Image (tube, coloured by chain):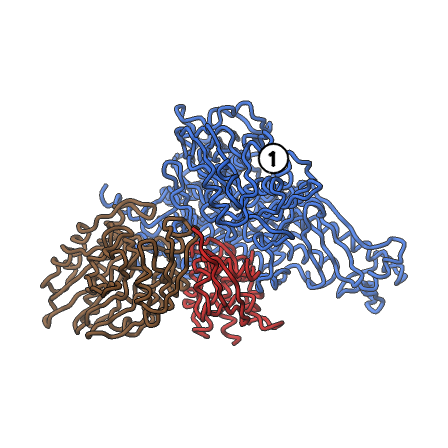
Chain colours: A red, B blue, C brown
Amino acid sequence: MTAEPIRITVTVNGESFREEVPATRSLLDFLRDDLGLTGTKEGCSEGECGACAVILDGRLVDACLIFAAEADGRSVETVEGLADGEELHPLQRTFAAAGAAQCGYCTPGMLMACKSLLDRNPSPTREEVTHGIAGNLCRCTGYGTIIQAVMEAAKES
Amino acid sequence: MKVVGQELPRVEILEKVTGQSVFGADVSPAGRVLHGKMVRSPHPHARITAVRTEGAERLPGVRAVVTAADLPPVHYGNFVRDEEYFARTKVRYVGDRIAAVAAVDEETAEEAARLIEVDYQVLPAVTSGPEAMAPEAPVIHEDHADYWAQPSVENRRGNVCGHKQIMRGDPERGFAEADRIFEHRFHVPMVHQTYIEPHTVLAQFDASGKATVWVPTQAQFPLRAAIAQILRMPMTKVRVIPTEIGGGFGGKISPTIEPAAVALARKARQPVRIVMTRGEDFQGSNPRHPFHLRYKTGVRLDGTITAREIELVLGTGYSAGSGVMISQGAAVRAPGPYRIPNLRIDSYCVYTNTPTCGAYRGPAGPQLTFASESQIDIIARELGIDPVEMRLRNAFEDGDETPAGARLEDVHARETLRKAADVMNERPRPAGENIGRGLAVAHWLVGGMASSAGVKLNEDGTIGILTGVVDLSGASTSLAQIAAEVLGVSLDDVHVRTADTDFAPHSTISAGSQALKSMGSAVLLAAREVKRQIQQVAADKLEADLGDLELDDNKVFVKGSPERAVSLREVGHLALEHERGPIVSTQSVSRLVPHPAVAAHAAEVAVDPETGHVRILRYVAVQDVGTAVNPLSVRGQIEGGVMQGLGQALSEACTFTDGKMDNPNLLDYKIFSALDAPAVETHLIQHPCASGPLGAKGVGEPPIIPPPAVIANAVADAVGVRIHDLPITPEKIVRALKARRQP
Amino acid sequence: MRRFHYLAPRRLDEALSLLTPDAVPLAGGTDLFLRMERRQTQPDAVVDLKRIPDMDRIEPSDGGLRIGALAPMESLAASSLIVNGYRALAESARVVGSIQTRNRATIGGNLANASPAADTATPLLALGATAEAGRVDGSRELPLEQLFLGPGRTALESGELLTAVRIPAMPGRTGSSFQRCVRTAMDIAVVNCAAFVKLDEDGAVEDARIALGAVGPTPLRALSAESCLQGRRFDADAAAEAAECAAHDARPIDDVRASADYRKDMVRVLTRRAVENAFQRARGEA
């Protein structure tokens, strides 16, 4: 069957984008292919790995399991919006210093999960951090340095 | 040392934390990119009687369809040429490549792939190594004997594509001298690397007949050669550009979708991208070999091992791949880090109807160590000896030989082992039932491969390094630290670039823990030569003896009179006017002497005897790393390796029913999340290693090796049951506990 | 994925009128998206319910609770009404997938998918919940037991939509508990179990409900385990006997996640733990 493209308006990292997309387009593909924001990664497209995690209207979500059309009129935060101009987000600084990114592929989603956690809970316990990143798989670090980086970022802010 | 040994962030870290790193799927070339899709076999073993592509070709939006008919009749393979890229007459595993399509969008590509019709005559399949060795087993490669094979591949027959035998001493006498003989069987299933970035490729084919391939690969030079061989193109008509790589762990060495992408791009005259789905990646890449192992060990009552007889059956999958090499290497490491005078080792590499297994981090290591170190524990308990003491009694030392007869130097097995035991014993066991401790020790042999690297002094006094090695685990940073150390600059003054196959000096692959050893040695030579050239130019300027000049703080100065100095920046400029010209050097190394790298781990676990769940209370990882060039990277490698090893210990397995993988997704293939991961207490044993650059040893492989054995030993200590078959799932523990209650 | 029409009605009646046989409702999408990607579901139209106001409300109703079908798991886990009054439900909502999933996945989706392992289904069965099914010409309420027919199959008729779940009031001396067994922390349940008990003034069981998940074609009530507890005071034997009965009530199969034998064993363990815990809570001890 044919289906008409849908016109959507989505605010991404504070900037409003008006695009036409087919109904089948995922939010992940919309960000990567339509807007060229390739920081958000595809890891499984099954909602299991968290590489595509972004913040949608203040809530952490996996962009691979959301239709772009569902984001119409809503606001998305991605890794590209984390730094304030030249000024890195505290998490970006502590991730770098702690060695919390190795291959770096899970890092954008992981950073968004951590940001979302700190937005909700500015001084989390280690256990709360662990729960906060449980939906983001990392195969390189063993998670210890990531948890350390979040604890340090929480201390900073 | 000022830079080497420092915990420094990786040189590419800012791109990574800002999302700017360009991974495989992030590359965008000029021109509209087509979506490529593979067509794969649904059967583990079947004869192909017809392939019809007309329906797909007629579909609007389809730009190219390729099958075996579009490729030259090439058999390829590094050890046995038993592989054809697209199946021609037979498919040999679920996921075998039949065809590929390229279309204007993903939906059309999917639709076209579905429209390709294949007629199969289904054949009986076999997915386990021992079953494939049985006389009545279906034969996977009928023309096996006709395939070209390297001379080292011995005793090929039936589904056995290689059998390596090692004899040392007199095993019969060794067993006769033993007070007790123990024999156990173990099984380790296939596991998958599960890098978070799936396989992906972008290929372009230009009017001059040159293919450009952007791909996250660990092995750009071998990949170039493989693509050229498969498509019968001149090698330098293939340019492989390695992108940032989202994890490899050995799974991104062999060609997978790259030749198809090139063939499609060539036919469509448009760039083609293929991204594997997660399910495709599980079934169409190169996981870790499943092993069946039999260990027979003779010991004296004091714990001295007198002989070992070891039989290994490794299921390689539908082609030999690197399986033959891995089975040969497995034979050499099978006895463990011990001095055992009498050995008989038989290692069989066997075809099965599964994906071809590859070189997952520490190939064969976790399998061998699970069996060997489980058995050492069993024996120690039976003999009433402390398991650590038993290991110390037999541990190998400098001057001992591998079963293959290579002399070992820089061995620190005892110290590493003792440290792991000591760290665990620093704290008492918590009170309570069903808590246990276990330990295991293992070694990896770090070789070295032909490599070259370029180092130059820029006119502004900074240093450039040109390599062809892909940065998988912090290699670029460590190479920069080595150059910075030699040239007296800070890490910020060193720029490292991994160039592509057209421009990079030939470099080793990023695998086997040898990237730093090989490339670090080349960079060290080149940096030393650049230093000599700098001294040459500076000597003229300072009117000093070349031998009196030292480099530090971005300056060259006369030893003892630091005021007589010239900055590297000035040297950079002076060199252009100087008779010697720009300062640059490219240096090479060839195969390097292998060194052993030892890891000893210990765990404390609590087992819920009702549900079988294992909770890791403490995990200690001690590793003999030589000089830790960047301890931050080294610890990161160890902690990550431990976690992969723990997954293999407790939850990971590719399982098959009727030749089809049961769990090709991240819901049912269980890798560790943050909630499963214990904190790792990491300790480094640092003694500079003679054969490594500035004393460094390889670090990536060893940490993944001990965990399955460590957990098996800890579980046995906690609840008294021994699991011989990985992973050690709650269900297996409950079953074993029930069996013990109802004998 | 096959192409389809995306519809985003702003009113419930409009949504109901769009739910033709070739249309599917979209809530959180965490299951539906995957099924469409894998072409296990190939609808002509997808009706996104998230633009309809108030479908995600959690509110007191008739002394009990009414949970709008669009309420996401994370809201359930955080709702003080649920955390204080219906602990087994809060405990189950807390473990459904990752935070990302819990922010999207809704209670309506979790139930309407009719997965035998649905984590919120067992506590809702134990708590005596009913499902509210809306259609163009009105709505009906059915006990949750009657909603599930088999894996992926519900009693909802064509054109009917699960609009809310109602749970009755929880008077004093009641307690509930949710237990589950998984392979790794982030997992679908290998077995899950919820228990509810209501005690009389003497501490004897006046009412008990026990529900089991992932051990049959649907989430199911362990009826013989329930009757075994009737009228009894708590002791170790009572819990153990109920557990044994529950193991008989379970009808598990072998699959990639576990064998039927292990599942039966886990029914025993989890039922005993859930019953003990529910008792403690009913007596105000936990």
The residue marked by circle 1 belongs to what chain? B
Q: Nearer the viewer, residue C34 or B379?
A: C34
Residue B478 relative to residue B292: left or right:
right
Coordinates of residue C132 in the picture (x, y in percent): 23, 65
In-image side of B258 versus C277 (left or right): right
- Who's the residue at 67% across and 61% down the image? B3
Relative height, residue C120 to residue B363 (above, below): below
Q: Position of residue B199 (x, y in %)?
A: 53, 47
Q: Position of residue B65 (x, y in %)?
A: 54, 39
Residue B321 point in image, percent of width and height: 54, 36
Q: Nearer the viewer, residue B44 or C240?
A: B44
Q: Quadrant of residue B553?
A: bottom right
- Residue depicted at x 62% and y 40%: B266
Work out whether residue B689 or residue B86 is closer to the camera in this orientation and state it. Answer: B86
Query: Which residue lies at the image location 43% right of the left edge and 68% below the top edge?
Result: A59
Q: Which residue is mark 1?
A: B230
The answer, for residue B414, to whether it is visible in the render is: no
Q: Quadrant of the N terminus of chain B?
A: bottom right
Residue at position x 25%, y 55% from top? C154
**Pointer 1: residues within 10 angstroms few (<14), some, or many (20+)?**
many
Residue placed farthest to the bottom in the image?
Answer: A157
* SS at circle 1: helix
Which quadrant would the C terminus of chain B be assigned to in this image? top left
Relative horizontal placement of residue B641, taking residue B586 as reference (left or right): left
Amino acid type indicated by mark 1 = Ile
Instruction: Please determine whether, in this image, residue B527 is positioned above or below residue B330.
Output: below
Q: Is residue A141 visible?
A: yes
A14 lies above or below B140: below
Q: Count the marks: how many?
A: 1
